């Protein structure tokens, strides 16, 4: 099933008894109704950097966003918007699972996916080399026994601005909102600061209401030497490794200019 409301673009699928599936789809539609209005009501707060003094959003989806990015706030600039797609997917999936007994379900919000897996089920994921013209470079599987219930991909070709140069960073985590926030953080870290082949612009010049303000975001990346690609990936991998050690994510795959680095429990197979 396809659901859309403004920038929210969901692909929803449920598996189970036909009556349960239809009930879940009705619940998904009902949960999406008014969801965007709730976020817009607190948009200034959701676009503000999270600090120890930050107010907590009242909207339940906004609260999911806030909770997902808070662990990253001490390390640098981040706003709840870094987790918006994953948090929306989570909220819709939660309504589906509450409404009906399902063996498996997922909500895919532009590549950020919330999963429900009952015992004995699994979910196959394809890793894309760049989200704007996706082709798979690898595949992986998530089993019901795994702790992963969220998948997210970020990078400079995605729907949001990136401070880094990664073509794609895919993260597996316990929730979709956590995966979304972490993918943003890791993708920002895949970078070569000051490199002359990288063209950047202030986010506010490209989109006046961007939550990134005057921070420089990546517009284009020229030709990079193999050792430069390796260095950029290493910069991102060090952040991803730390997130795995801290228990914030389960695994990550970082992709740049045809090269890939992985960390954590992610077994990749050729696409």
Image: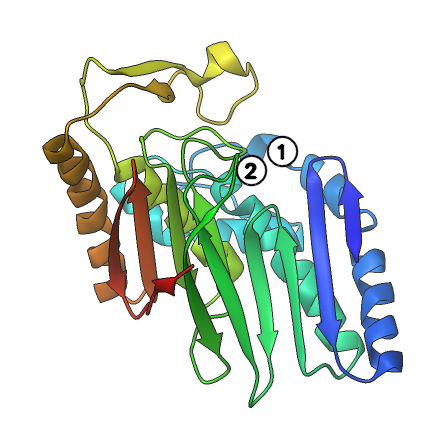
Residue 232: which quarter of the image? top left
Q: Residue at x 85, y 58 (%)?
A: 30
Marks 2 and 1 close (CB-CB < 8 Å): yes
In the rendered image, the vertical position of residue 102 relative to residue 85, given as above or below = below
Relative placement, left or right, of 227 versus 9 is: left
Q: Can you identify the residue that label 1 sits on?
A: 43
Spatial separation of the CA atoms under disc 2 and disc 1: 5 Å
Q: Residue at x 74, y 42 (%)?
A: 36
In the rendered image, the vertical position of residue 30 relative to residue 228, given as above or below = below
The image quadrant where one finds the C terminus is bottom left
Q: Residues within 10 Å of mark 1 (few under 14, many from 20)?
A: some
Toward the left, the furthest residue is 227
Q: Can you identify the residue that label 2 sits on?
A: 46
Q: Is residue 118 visible?
A: yes
Q: Nearer the viewer, residue 204 or 187?
A: 187
Q: Nearer the viewer, residue 41 or 227?
A: 227
Q: Residue at x 51, y 42 (%)?
A: 134
Q: Residue at x 32, y 44 (%)?
A: 255
Relative placement, left or right, of 135 versus 63 is: left
Give the image location of residue 149, x and y in percent.
51, 69
């Amino acid at each position: 099933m396809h659901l859309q409301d403004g920038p929210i673009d969901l692909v929803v699928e449920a598996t189970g008894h036909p009556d349960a599936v239809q009930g879940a789809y009705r619940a998904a539609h009902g949960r999406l109704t008014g969801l965007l209005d709730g976020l817009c009501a607190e948009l200034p707060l959701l676009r503000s950097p999270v600090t120890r003094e930050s107010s907590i959003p009242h909207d339940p989806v906004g609260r999911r966003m806030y909770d997902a990015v808070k662990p990253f706030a001490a390390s640098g600039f981040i706003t709840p918007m870094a987790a918006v797609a994953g948090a929306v997917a989570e909220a819709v999936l939660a309504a589906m699972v509450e409404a009906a007994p399902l063996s498996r379900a997922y909500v895919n919000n532009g590549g950020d996916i919330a999963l429900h897996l009952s015992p004995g089920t699994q979910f196959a994921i394809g890793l894309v080399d760049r989200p704007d013209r996706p082709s798979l470079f690898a595949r992986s599987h998530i089993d019901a026994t795994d702790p992963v219930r969220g998948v997210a991909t970020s990078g400079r070709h995605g729907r949001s601005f990136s401070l880094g140069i990664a073509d794609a960073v895919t993260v597996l985590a316990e929730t979709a909102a956590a995966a979304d926030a972490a993918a943003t953080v890791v993708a920002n870290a895949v970078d070569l600061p000051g490199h002359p082949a990288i063209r950047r612009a202030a986010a506010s010049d490209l989109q006046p209401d961007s939550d990134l303000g005057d921070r420089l975001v990546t517009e284009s990346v020229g030709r990079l030497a193999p050792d430069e690609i390796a260095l950029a990936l290493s910069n991102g991998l060090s952040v991803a490794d730390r997130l795995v050690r801290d228990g914030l994510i389960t695994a990550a795959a970082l992709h740049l200019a045809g090269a890939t680095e992985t960390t954590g429990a992610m077994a990749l197979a050729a696409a």
